[in-house]
Image: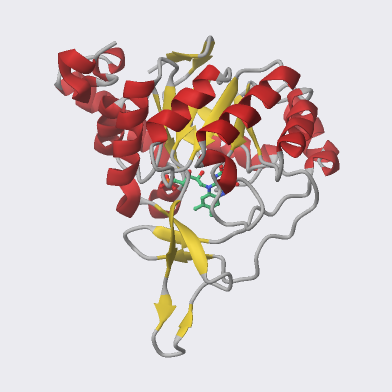
């Protein structure tokens, strides 16, 4: 099910979400071989960062809570990874974060020189005190960071947004006005907390964490719906997608591509192949095409 995204041919509309399977060539190649159309690297930061102490990820059955805390070797400590990735034959989305506009610019400029196919800026991570979140909940700072990054890169820019934004449509519009080529929504929701009632303590070492997986899907679908009404650029929709029917729903909200992160835990790496064939079967059964259902939930009035 070949699709065109920002001028690039992808073998299908599924995307590996950032942070779930790392950044190594071997791991990303395996994801691509398992049927994924576009692979996203773990977010790369301005300097070495260990992330939070364990436990950092908990499976709640209906979704996950995580406070991984953006561990990263730092953008200038990744020569080995980039050397291996240079020989790749799969489309690559590099994700970056920073603690200030200057840091975002510095990391983006350096990463863009490694020739990823797309550069995603994570302005939405809720798991770190200093990084990210602040930009994605405010229109002015979202505009500032996107326009600053846009000036120093020469690959298409994707802005990754948080569902915590009071009006995510307005944030998406600010990113589009600042030069973003696409929107990716959503990052984890929350933050949430889980308490172990026997020890009477929060289960995550960081106490609070971002929610992902099926329990956040209705939030993600609403966000993508709001973004579709606010912008004309394409949207990568993600948050809780685990089946082909979930993908259909997200596409109907307005997504052109569908991302998956937690689903890899629930269905294994084969989830990309399976969701693709489930999506194809649904489209075949309904005698329709993916292009015809993008934004279908907006009806005639909302269609573009
Ligand atoms: C363990 C874990 C690590 C994550 N790390 C990142 C990250 O480094 N950068 C980022 O933009 N999103 C990160 N995310 C968020 C995912 O990319 C995705 O937006 C979110 O999990 C919702 O999608 P899902 O419900 O399919 O998992 C992470 C999510 C999880 C569960």
Taking the image as shown, residue 125 lies to the left or right of residue 292, namely right
Q: Residue at x 40, y 15 (%)?
A: 232
Image spot of residue 247 (x, y percent):
31, 33
Image spot of residue 24 (x, y percent):
69, 42
Taking the image as shown, residue 242 lies to the left or right of residue 175, namely left
- What colour scheme does the image use? secondary structure
Q: Quadrant of the N terminus?
A: top left
Relative to 279, is 193 above or below?
below
Image spot of residue 228 (x, y percent):
34, 23
Q: Quadrant of the C terminus?
A: top left
Q: Residue at x 38, y 51 (%)?
A: 213
Q: Is residue 33 visible?
A: no
Name the foreground residue: 259 vs 218.
218
Outermost residue toward the front in this view: 140
Q: Quadrant of residue 167?
A: top left
Q: Residue at x 29, y 19 (%)?
A: 294
Image spot of residue 261 (x, y percent):
46, 45
Name the foreground residue: 140 vs 18.
140
Taking the image as shown, residue 296 lies to the left or right of residue 178, namely left
Relative to 146, is 137 above or below?
below
Q: Residue at x 46, y 49 (%)?
A: 188
Q: Is residue 222 visible?
A: yes
Q: Quadrant of residue 273?
A: top left
Relative to 133, is 202 above or below?
below
Q: How many marks?
A: 0
């Amino acid at each position: 099910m070949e699709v065109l995204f920002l001028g690039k041919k992808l073998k299908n509309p599924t995307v590996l979400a950032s942070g779930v399977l790392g950044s190594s060539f071997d791991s990303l190649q395996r994801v691509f071989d398992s049927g994924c159309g576009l692979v996203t690297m773990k977010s790369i930061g301005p300097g070495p960062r260990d992330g939070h102490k364990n436990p950092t990820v908990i499976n709640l059955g209906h979704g996950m809570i995580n406070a991984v805390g953006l561990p990263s070797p730092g953008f200038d400590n990744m020569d080995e990874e980039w050397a291996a990735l240079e020989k790749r034959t799969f489309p690559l989305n590099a994700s970056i974060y920073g603690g200030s506009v200057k840091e975002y610019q510095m990391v983006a400029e350096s990463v863009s020189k490694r020739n990823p196919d797309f550069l995603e800026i994570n302005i939405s991570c809720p798991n770190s005190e200093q990084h990210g979140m602040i930009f994605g909940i405010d229109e002015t700072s979202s505009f500032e960071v996107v326009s600053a990054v846009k000036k120093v890169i020469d690959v298409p820019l994707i802005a990754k947004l948080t569902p915590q934004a009071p009006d995510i449509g307005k944030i998406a519009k600010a990113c589009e006005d600042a030069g973003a080529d696409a929107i990716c929504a959503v990052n984890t929701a929350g933050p949430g907390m889980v308490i172990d009632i026997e020890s009477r303590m929060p289960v995550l070492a960081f106490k609070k964490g971002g929610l992902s997986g099926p329990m956040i899907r209705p939030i993600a679908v609403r966000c993508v719906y709001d973004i579709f009404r606010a912008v004309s650029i394409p949207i990568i929709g993600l948050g809780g997608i685990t089946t082909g029917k979930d993908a259909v729903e997200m596409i109907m909200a307005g997504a052109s591509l569908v991302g998956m992160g937690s689903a890899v835990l629930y269905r294994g790496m084969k989830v990309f192949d399976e969701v693709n064939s489930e999506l194809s079967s649904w489209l075949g059964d309904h005698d329709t095409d993916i292009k015809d259902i993008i934004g279908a939930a907006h009806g005639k009035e909302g269609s573009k």
